[in-house]
Image: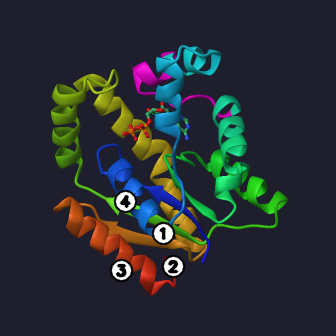
Amino acid sequence: MSARMVLLGPPGAGKGTQAARIAERLGIPAISTGDIFRANVAGATELGTRAKAYMDKGEYVPDSITNAMVADRIAQADCEGGFLLDGYPRTTAQVGELDSMLKDSGLALDVVVEITADAEAVVARLLKRAGEQGRADDTEPVIRRRLEVYAESTAPLAGIYAERGLLVQVDGMGEIDTVTGRIMEALAARGVTA
Ligand code: ADP
């Protein structure tokens, strides 16, 4: 079956890791706006140059840049059978944008998975990743800012999707495999299977 999904959760909740696993099992592409931005920064494209200033401060990239990028990506052929969005939407305005992108093609979201995680645990995970991968936005002040921006702008999205009956919450604390199992189970309970 096709599955059009959104993965929500704070920085460090394990969205990227879980997105790749879930998407593979369901046979749909995982689309990470953060990864697309980072690839553009690495390639020094115009999009990357515009996004970098915001990313380095832990702020969101303006919607005018982000929405166009996502619209373009989900219009590609590999998304016809569904997709898993990781890191989009992140604001209520982006929720509306995504709705209209899908509606234009007669489509709608099937499910939104929120990975929950304890605030101190996510800071610890991100600081550990900073040591290992050296991501430019993984310094403690920027991590704190990303968490603040998440709490202000993105956490309320769970309520919006819950009202629509689309939200499934999954505990993101524990082993990677355990969390993947929880997500697959929650999806299966909603009829989303490979
Ligand atoms: P995080 O682990 O902080 O969730 P991501 O890799 O998802 O990291 O995103 C990294 C950065 O890319 C964000 O802090 C933000 O600057 C930018 N970004 C990613 N997705 C969006 C979006 N939907 N809207 C605005 N900015 C975004």
Q: Position of residue 113 (x, y in %)?
A: 45, 65
According to the picture, the residue beneath numbered tag 3 turns out to be 185
The quadrant holding residue 73 is: top right
Do tag 1 and tag 4 residues touch (Cβ < 8 Å)?
no
Residue 151 image point, x, y percent: 40, 46
Residue type for callout 3: Glu
Sequence-first tag of 4 and 3: 4
How many angstroms separate mark 1 from mark 2 (CA)? 8 Å
Q: Amino acid at mark 1?
A: Leu
* Residue 131: image tag: none
Residue range of the region highlighted in magenta in the rendering: 53-63
Crowding at mark 2 (Cα within 10 Å: few <14, some 14-19, many 20+): some
Decide if residue 177 is on the left or right side of residue 165.
left
Contact between marks 1 and 2 (CB within 8 A): the answer is yes
Kindly identify which residue carries mark 1. 26
The residue that mark 2 highlights is: 192
Residue depicted at 35% across the width and 30% down the height:
145
Looking at the rendered image, the disc whose residue lies closer to the viewer, 1 or 3, is 1
Alpha carbon of mark 4 to alpha carbon of mark 3: how far?
A: 13 Å
Question: Which residue position holds label 4?
Answer: 21
Q: Residue at x 46, y 36 (%)?
A: 35
Inspect the magenta stretch and tell me whether residue 97 lies in it: no
User: Pointer 1: residues within 10 angstroms few (<14), some, or many (20+)?
Assistant: some
Judging from the image, what secondary structure is the residue with disc 1 in?
A: helix
The crowd level at tag 3 (other Cα within 10 Å; few <14, some 14-19, many 20+) is some
Q: Are marks 4 and 3 in contact (CB under 8 Å)?
A: no
Q: How far is mark 1 from mark 4, CA to CA?
A: 9 Å
For badge 4, the amino acid type reads: Arg
Q: CA distance from mark 2 to mark 3?
A: 9 Å
Relative to 150, residue 159 above or below: below
- Nearer-N-terminus badge (1/4): 4
Q: Give above or below for 70 relative to 77.
A: above
